[in-house]
Amino acid sequence: MKESVIRALLFDFFEGKTTSIQRKMIEEWLAEPQNEELYYRYLDQWESEHPQFAPDADHALAHFQTMLSGIGDEPVQPIGREPVGRVSRNTWLWTAAAAMITIVFGVAFQKQVLYKSLESAPGRTVSYRLSEGTEVLLNANSSLLVPRFGFSGSTREVILDGEAEFKVTHTAGHDRFVVKMGDHYQIEVLGTEFVAFSRARGKRVFLKNGKVKLQLPQGKQVYMKPGSLFVSGRDGAFKMTAPADPRPYTAWKEQTFYFDNTLLSDVAAQIEEQFDVRVRIPDTLLAQRRIGGIYKATQADDLLLILSDLMEIEITQKEDHIELTIPKLP
């Protein structure tokens, strides 16, 4: 099909005007991976031309008061621990609540009320299945905000703080799945598998299967292919590579640390991220020493003991942190 015909067909689809035959044509067209990028571009263009939300404050207040009078949420449950729950609720309820809370209380309170926080404890990974089937494996000391009353509209949006692996379900309506990572970074996909990292020291995305679009600060966009790695530091500078070995970015799923000529300062940062234990290295030369190898560690002490033996360093417990130092000569 010509690009102009595709554009017209997709715009009708986004507006809900397509027939069942046309929707089947779009589904078959989207089955070709190379067409996903064009789909995203036209969806972005259509959404910019067709604002999707016009709040009715009185109507929203009435529905929000009804919700507060007794309607509860049904949180997503960890896979394999308890029966999987659902986060589904009528779309009108979610929209009404969002409008009223934003108007009356502001964005921060809106996030607290309208989102359910899925969390993992320090040193523990946990799996969740979202209401539409997407599977999420949270790395230790991480959290994922999901809509408390279910996804609405054509976009499934979640907010990540930490690290997680996503296996996104491709819906019949080709709904986008968006992972917001803070600092104006977000990932957009239809159905794919990737690992996302969003912590204080930067952002990282490793794409295992499918194709994703990254939205970056200042309006920049990056498209990723399977096997590619995106890394961005605190300063916003980023690079794209295709690592031959994905284990450094997926080892955490087995509670394993993968070091490949890794700075000890980076090891300390990983301990803090995984186990919520502050590690300090006063000696800058010691912080620049490097280590390699694959090590299993389910708690901070496991890894600290390995470092002590391999690098001949002293581990000292201070009042609010652990300190790594070079032993003093007698």
Image (cartoon, helix red, strand yellow):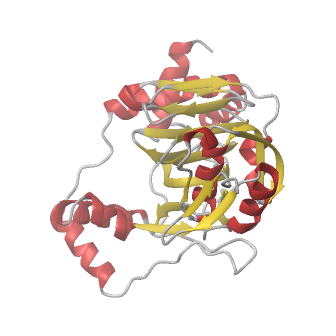
In front of the other: 235 or 314: 314
Return the x and y of residue 155 as percentages of the image width and height.
48, 47
Looking at the image, the residue that sits furthest to the front is: 330
Residue 17 visible somewhere in the drawing: no
Return the x and y of residue 101 as percentages of the image width and height.
25, 65
In front of the other: 198 or 262: 262
Q: Is residue 46 above or below residue 65?
A: above
**Quadrant of res 322:** bottom right
Q: Is residue 126 above or below residue 309?
A: below
- At 67% from the left and 36% from the top, the residue drawn is 27
Specify whether 258 is left or right of 280.
Answer: right
Return the x and y of residue 102 as percentages of the image width and height.
24, 60
In front of the other: 42 or 282: 282
Looking at the image, the residue that sits furthest to the bottom is: 70
Q: How many marks?
A: 0
Quadrant assignment for the N terminus: top right
- At 63% from the left and 57% from the top, the residue drawn is 271
Quadrant assignment for the C terminus: bottom right
- At 66% from the left and 62% from the top, the residue drawn is 315
Q: Is residue 52 above or below residue 313?
A: above
- At 76% from the left and 63% from the top, the residue drawn is 305
**Quadrant of res 3:** top right
Residue 269 visible somewhere in the drawing: yes
**Quadrant of res 307:** bottom right
Return the x and y of residue 253 as percentages of the image width and height.
76, 56
